[in-house]
Amino acid sequence: MKRKVIILKTGSARVELRQQFGDFEDWILAGLPADLPGVDVLDVRQPGFQKTDPGHSLVIITGSHDNVTDQPFYLSDLCGWLQSAVALNVPLLGICYGHQLLASAFGGRVDFNSKGIELGTVQLNLLPEAAADPLFSPLPKQFLANVSHSQSVLEIPAGATVLAASVLEAVQAFRLRPAVYGVQFHPEFTLPIMQAYVQLKRGQIDSNSQDIETILAGIKPTPLSFGLIADFYRLFGQSD
């Protein structure tokens, strides 16, 4: 039986982006199969979200403009919910902030990346451990993905396996358990969304270290990264 999808909504896109492209959950849905048995969007900023039973679901955690180190008010409840979901063998994919939340919930360490903001289209390099991983092994050893983050997973949880890295980011992807993954990159970002994000980040970029026009010129299609969401559902979207 196919699993329904729970999208854990941990934030919202900027107004300018929502008006043009929809919100974070819409971008994720665009990467999922069209014949899902059901989708629930669960906003973790709303009271009582943690009472939802993950049951026979597949869970995807969105990105956010929050920082894990800011200890947002919902963090403790959300970490507890994630721990319960993993204990129930629920397939789970955390994206960017969701990746960091997943690491934090299971004893990893998250903080600002000393190398600065990673933004735009970057090359990801698969590590040798990815060769035996069901989700990442079909990918080439190098592929392009879109990124936008200033915090990183600096220490992975005990027992986790790092699967991919980039020049600025040592943990672009990790596997915590079978069917439980975190990805620092944004598989849901299309080329137009990435371009719009960079434009909105102009005021945050240190011109001494990064040139915004160079970042914009380097944005490219990322079909292999985009396909990861559908691949995740294809591999783990069947319940026992």
Image (spheres, grey):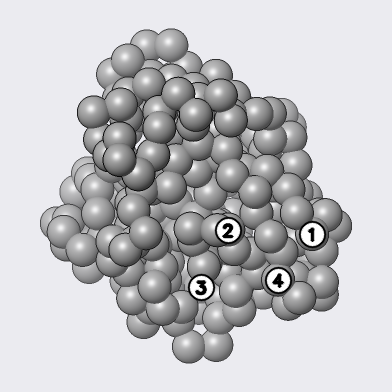
Q: Which residue is labeled 3 in the image?
A: 86
Residue 209's quadrant in the figure? top left
Residue 148 location in percent, x, y? Answer: 42, 42
What type is the residue that disc 1 sits on? Lys
Dot 4 or dot 2: first in sequence order is: 4
Q: Which residue is mark 1?
A: 141
Mark found first going from the N terminus, 2 or 3: 3
Residue 209 in the image: above or below residue 181: above
Residue 104: image x %, image y %?
Answer: 35, 72
Give yes or no for contact between labels 2 and 3 (Cβ–Cβ under 8 Å).
no
Residue 173, x across and y down, in percent: 58, 63
For residue 127, the mark is: 4
Q: With 41 as the anchor, is 80 left or right in this view?
A: left
Location of the C terminus by quadrant is bottom right
The amino acid beneath tag 2 is: Ser
Secondary structure at numbered mark 2: loop
- Left or right: residue 231 compared with residue 215: right
SS category of the residue bearing label 4: loop
Q: Specify whether 34 is left or right of 102.
A: right
